[in-house]
Amino acid sequence: MSTAIDRMTGLRPVVLTGDRPTGGLHLGHLAGSLAERVRLQETCDQFVLVADLQAMTDNAGNPAKVAEAVPEVVADYIAAGLDPTKSTMFLQSGIPELSELTMLYLNLVTVSRLERNPTVRDEIRQRGFERDIPAGFLCYPISQSADITAFRATKVPVGDDQLPMIELAQEIAIRVNRLGGSEILPRPEAVLSAVTRLPGIDGLGKASKSLGNAIQIGDPADVVREKVRMMFTDPNHLRVSDPGRVEGNVVFSYLDAFDGDVAAVADLKDRYRAGGLGDSVLKRRLADVLEALLSPMRERRRAIGRDEAMAILAAGTLRARAVAAQTLVSVRSALGMPVLV
Ligand code: TRP
């Protein structure tokens, strides 16, 4: 079997990306990062990490949630089309070298630099940590820099909220290279996905598992239909004959993201704006589109159980670890760490 590592020539760009395992993945992930990764695996050496250590930085009181989500996330990756022979999927905590790199990088970053990270600041506010910020949480961007640099990744596909993390990884790479006196770590660049954020079915914000307003990749067909039935449309579109609003209408956002027939959707928008088109017609179309998308994914998801998902992760972790271990040797040497003989 040809694996991602076998095909590594050093010529293909290295991609590193990943997710915190706090629940299964949803259509927002699919429209944004997952579809992009399925494309990138054809042309790049792609590493996809399940960031369980990062998830623990704000879930230390609920480790079962993280542990249970790990095989879920892997099953969703496979369902969405990630191929273990093309993408190396691995578990962050299965690579102790990442933790050692983090330990070394901690000395290259100041506390005030960490406190300035706008994404971390938002998260601290959302979680109500106030003065009781877990040290691991404040430092997770350093651990994320270890994830990125360990694989010498140059492309990091992420949402714009992750830009401060990439910036920090760039700074750390520069510091390591300067200290080591050579180009040990390449400069990682963010690759922003073009898709705008998918709204939740309630239209109140972005789709999120924890808010319960997302359609999960693993949702059964009847649950998907029910979620589509409950979707927020236009509260002033009371009678079928009334003109309806397309902007802010969640059904149209999803049709834009997932219905391949752009001309038909444009026509539906015209008819909806003019009046005379009922929500139920739109919702039936969306339910059919989503069913066509999700049913093969559901099959693939069913075909791999928890054990197989964990076995895929274990094999990927073994391959990824060998790469991270090499980088660690170079970084230790660049930073002047003693060598045991
Ligand atoms: N911070 C990312 C998230 O919240 C997950 C993540 C961890 C990640 N390590 C990474 C993403 C490295 C890109 C690269 O989803």
Image (cartoon, rainbow, N blue to C red):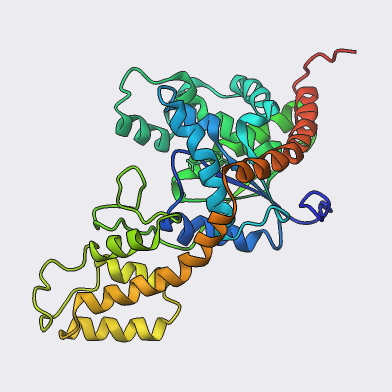
Residue 272 appears in which quarter of the rendering? bottom left
Q: Quadrant of the N terminus?
A: bottom right
Q: Would you say residue 191 is visible in this rendering?
A: no
Where in the figure is residue 138, as x and y percent of width and height?
46, 25
Q: Is residue 280 above or below residue 47?
A: below
Q: Position of residue 169 (x, y in %)?
A: 60, 37
- Asked whether, in this view, residue 315 is left or right of residue 56, the answer is right
Q: Is residue 22 visible?
A: yes
The answer to whether residue 177 is above or below residue 34 is above
- Residue shown at the point (61%, 29%) measured from the top left: 93
- Closer-to-camera residue (150/84): 84
Which residue occupies 33% across, 83% down? 266
**Figure label count:** 0
- Residue at x 33% of width, y 77% of height: 285
Q: Looking at the image, which is closer to me, 339 or 18? A: 18
Which residue is located at x 67 percent, y 45 percent?
312
Residue 110, position as x, y percentages in the image: 52, 22
Query: Looking at the figure, which quarter contains the C terminus?
Result: top right
Q: Is residue 122 left or right of residue 17?
A: left
**Residue 277 vertical placement versus 141 (above, below):** below
Q: Which picture quadrant has residue 153?
A: top right
Rendered location of residue 198, percent (x, y): 37, 59
Position of 25 with respect to 213 (left or right) is: right
Q: Is residue 171 above or below residue 131?
A: below
The residue lying furthest to the right in this view is 341
Judge by depth and name the residue closer to the eye, 184 or 13: 13
